[in-house]
C-alpha cells in the first residue's frame, strides 16, 4: 500500500495532479501487477492535508517510537536530534503516583529516620512492588529491569544489594506499614470497614525437604507432594486488601482465626463483621470472633450431619427471591445462649448443575458396576475397593452383606435435597437475611485477590530460601496487589487492560551535539482518561534536558 500521484492534461493545456491511496494486486490474465485505487484525496492544489495527517497519526499508533523516528529521518533527512532508545514509563508512572498518593514513600522514610542508610531503600521497595505488577521477575531480574527495560523515575541507580536490604527493612517495619497504609487507603477511597473478608491459600516450593515455614500440609494447589506455605489475606467488601499473613505450610484454616482477629484488634476498626468460609467454622472460632463486640458471617459445612443443620434443612416455608438465582430462607434454632441464626440459601441455576453432575457420576458408576459383573460369593477385588474408596463415586455406593456393592438410592435422595443449597450462620441480628447472603457472596473478592497474586503478580515461584525473605516476598506481592486493586476500583477497568494501555506510553531519549533530551510520547485519549479517573496529572512531555558543556576557544588555548 502506498501514496501515489497521477496527472492529466486539461483542454486548455493545464495539468492537474491527484493524490491517491493505492495498492498493487496481481492480475492472473496479464501476469503482472496492477495498481488498485483505495481512496482519492483530491487535487494537489486543493488537497485536504488534515486528512493525510489523520491517516499518518492513525498509522503511527502501531509503530514503535524508534520506527516513527526513523521514518521522519527518511522523509526529512538527518534530524538535529538522533534517537537513542525508548522504554515504557506509563505503568511505572501510574504506580508511583498511587504509591505517593497512599503515602508509602513517606511511611518508609519515617521508618528509616533513625537509621543511617545511604542506599535507596524506599525506591528499591517500590521497584520490587512495581515489577510484580508490570513484569514479574526474580530480584536479580528486577535489577536489570530497572536498569534497561523501564523508566521507573528513580533518581539514583538501584542494585541487587539495595533490593535485598530493602526486603529486610520492609519485613522489620511490616506491621507499621500495614497499619498506616490501611488508614491511607480508607481515606483515599472513603471506605467504611464494616465487613472484613478473610480466607487462606497455599503456594508450594519445588523441593522435597521441609524447613522453617515450608511444611507439608493441605495444598489448595493440589500439590500435597511438595512443601508449602499458607498465606492469609483480609480484604474489604470493595476488594481492597487490608493485611496479609505468611504462615507455616501445615497451618490449618481453623488455627488462623485467633491470630488474625488479635492482629487487627489494635486498628480501632469501626463496627466489624468477619466473613469467612466454612473451613474456618468451629465453636471456638465463633467465640473468638465475637470477642470485643465483633460479629461474624460464616459458611457452614453442609454435609457434616450435624443435627442443627438437619433442622435448618428440614425447615418448611417458602424461599424469598432477593436476586436472580438467589433465594433465601431465615431459620433460628435454639433459645437463650444456645440460640443460633441461620440463612439457608438456594441457587436454582446451581441446583440444575448439581443434578447434571450427579447424573454423570451415576452413569460412570453403572458402567463400572457392569464391568465388575456378578460379585456374589467372590473374594473382594481391588477394583471393588477402589470403587468404594473413590472420592466422588464412593459416596453413592453401599456394600451388601454378601460383599457386593450397589448404588445407594437413599444417598441419591439426600444429595438431591442439597442441590444448589448452602447454609450461612451469623451472630449479627441487625443484618437482614439479604445482607447476610450478599455479604457472603462477596467473599469471592478474596478468591479473586488470590488469583491475581498467583497469576498476574506471579507469586510463585519464590526464589528465596530464608524464612524472612519468603515473608518479605509475600508482603511485596501484597503491596503490588494493593496498588493494582486501587487502580481497578477507581477506573472500573481490569489491571490487564490498564497495564496494556499504560505501557504504550514511552520515555524517549534523543541526543545531539548540543545535549540530551528525555521526552514522553504523546498520551492517547485512553491513557488520559485513566489518569483522569485516578486523579493523576499526566507526565510532563519533556522529562529532562542536559546540555553538552562547550569549551570556549580562549580556554582551549590556555590548556594548550
Image: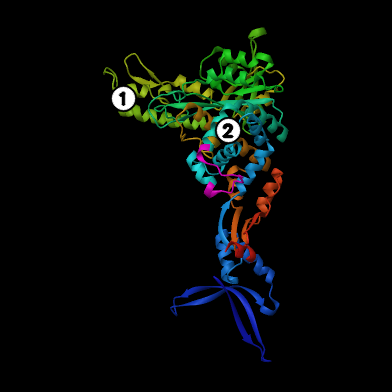
Q: Which residue is mark 2?
A: 478
Nearer the N terminus, badge 2 or badge 1?
Answer: 1
Along the line of sight, which residue is nearer the eye, 332 or 513? 513
* Residue lying farthest to the top in this orientation: 336
User: Element type at marker 2?
Assistant: helix
User: Element type at marker 1?
Assistant: helix
- Which disc number belongs to residue 460? none
Let me know if residue 156 is in the magenta part: yes
Q: Position of residue 524 (x, y in %)?
A: 65, 55
Q: Is residue 70 left or right of residue 438?
A: left
Along the line of sight, which residue is nearer the eye, 150 or 374? 150
Q: Which residue is mark 1?
A: 383
Location of the N terminus by quadrant is bottom right
Let me know if residue 78 is in the magenta part: no
Q: Position of residue 284 (x, y in %)?
A: 57, 12
Q: Tell me which segment is drawn in magenta.
A: 147-161
Residue 24, above or below 499 = below
Find the distance from the CA under tag 2 to the CA under tag 1: 47 Å
Q: Position of residue 182 (x, y in %)?
A: 66, 30
Considering the whole magenta stretch, tell me its main secondary structure.
loop
Q: Residue at x 71, y 35 (%)?
A: 188
Q: Position of residue 172 (x, y in %)?
A: 57, 27
Q: Is residue 113 left or right of residue 305?
A: right
Along the line of sight, which residue is nearer the eye, 75 or 330? 75
Amino acid at each position: 500500500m502506498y501514496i501515489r500521484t497521477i496527472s492529466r492534461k486539461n483542454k486548455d493545456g493545464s495539468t492537474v495532479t491527484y493524490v491517491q491511496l493505492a495498492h498493487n494486486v496481481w492480475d492472473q490474465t496479464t501476469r503482472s501487477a496492477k495498481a488498485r485505487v483505495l481512496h482519492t484525496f483530491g487535487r494537489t492544489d486543493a488537497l485536504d492535508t488534515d486528512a493525510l495527517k489523520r491517516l499518518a497519526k492513525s498509522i503511527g499508533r502501531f509503530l514503535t517510537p524508534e520506527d516513527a523516528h526513523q521514518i521522519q529521518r527518511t522523509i526529512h533527512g538527518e534530524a538535529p536530534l538522533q534517537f537513542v532508545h525508548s522504554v515504557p514509563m506509563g505503568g511505572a508512572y501510574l504506580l508511583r503516583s498511587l504509591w505517593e498518593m497512599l503515602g508509602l514513600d513517606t511511611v518508609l522514610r519515617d521508618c528509616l529516620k533513625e537509621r543511617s542508610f545511604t542506599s535507596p531503600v524506599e525506591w528499591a521497595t517500590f521497584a520490587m512492588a512495581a515489577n510484580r505488577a508490570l513484569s514479574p521477575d526474580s530480584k536479580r531480574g528486577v535489577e536489570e529491569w530497572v536498569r534497561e527495560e523501564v523508566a521507573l523515575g528513580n533518581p539514583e541507580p538501584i542494585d541487587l544489594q539495595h533490593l535485598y536490604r530493602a526486603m529486610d527493612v520492609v519485613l522489620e517495619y511490616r506491621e507499621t506499614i500495614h497499619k498506616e497504609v490501611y488508614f491511607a487507603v480508607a481515606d483515599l477511597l472513603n471506605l467504611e470497614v464494616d465487613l472484613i473478608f478473610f480466607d487462606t491459600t497455599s503456594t508450594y516450593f519445588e523441593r522435597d525437604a521441609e524447613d522453617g515455614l515450608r511444611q507439608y500440609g493441605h495444598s489448595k494447589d493440589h500439590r500435597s507432594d511438595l512443601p508449602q506455605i499458607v498465606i492469609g489475606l483480609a480484604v474489604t467488601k470493595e476488594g481492597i486488601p487490608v493485611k496479609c499473613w505468611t504462615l507455616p505450610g501445615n497451618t490449618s484454616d481453623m488455627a488462623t482465626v485467633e491470630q488474625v482477629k488479635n492482629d487487627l484488634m489494635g486498628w480501632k476498626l469501626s463496627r466489624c463483621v468477619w466473613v469467612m468460609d466454612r473451613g474456618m467454622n468451629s465453636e471456638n472460632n465463633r467465640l473468638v470472633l465475637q470477642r470485643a463486640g465483633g460479629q461474624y458471617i460464616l459458611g457452614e459445612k453442609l454435609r457434616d450431619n450435624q443435627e442443627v443443620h438437619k433442622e435448618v434443612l428440614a425447615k418448611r416455608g417458602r424461599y424469598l427471591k432477593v436476586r436472580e438465582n438467589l433465594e433465601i430462607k431465615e431459620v433460628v434454632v435454639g433459645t437463650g445462649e444456645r440460640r443460633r441464626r441461620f440463612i439457608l440459601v438456594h441457587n436454582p441455576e446451581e441446583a440444575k448443575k448439581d443434578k447434571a453432575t450427579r447424573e454423570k457420576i451415576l452413569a460412570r458408576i453403572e458402567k463400572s458396576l457392569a464391568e465388575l459383573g456378578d460379585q456374589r460369593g467372590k473374594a473382594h477385588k481391588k477394583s471393588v475397593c477402589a470403587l468404594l474408596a473413590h472420592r466422588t463415586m464412593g459416596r453413592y455406593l453401599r456394600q451388601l452383606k454378601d460383599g457386593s456393592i450397589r448404588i445407594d438410592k437413599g444417598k441419591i435422595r439426600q444429595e438431591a435435597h442439597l442441590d444448589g443449597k448452602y447454609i450461612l450462620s451469623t451472630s449479627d441480628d441487625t443484618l437482614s437475611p439479604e445482607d447476610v447472603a450478599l455479604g457472603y457472596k462477596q467473599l469471592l473478592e478474596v478468591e479473586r485477590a488470590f488469583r491475581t497474586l498467583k497469576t498476574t503478580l506471579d507469586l510463585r515461584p519464590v526464589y528465596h530460601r530464608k524464612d524472612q525473605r519468603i515473608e518479605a516476598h509475600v508482603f511485596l506481592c501484597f503491596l503490588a496487589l494493593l496498588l493494582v486493586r486501587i487502580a481497578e476500583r477507581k477506573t472500573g477497568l481490569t489491571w490487564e487492560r490498564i497495564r496494556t494501555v499504560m505501557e504504550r506510553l514511552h520515555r524517549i531519549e534523543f541526543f545531539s551535539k548540543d545535549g540530551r533530551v528525555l521526552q514522553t510520547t504523546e498520551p492517547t485519549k485512553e491513557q488520559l482518561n485513566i489518569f483522569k479517573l485516578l486523579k493523576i496529572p499526566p507526565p510532563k512531555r519533556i522529562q529532562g534536558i542536559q546540555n553538552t558543556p562547550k569549551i570556549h576557544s580562549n580556554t582551549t588555548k590556555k590548556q594548550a
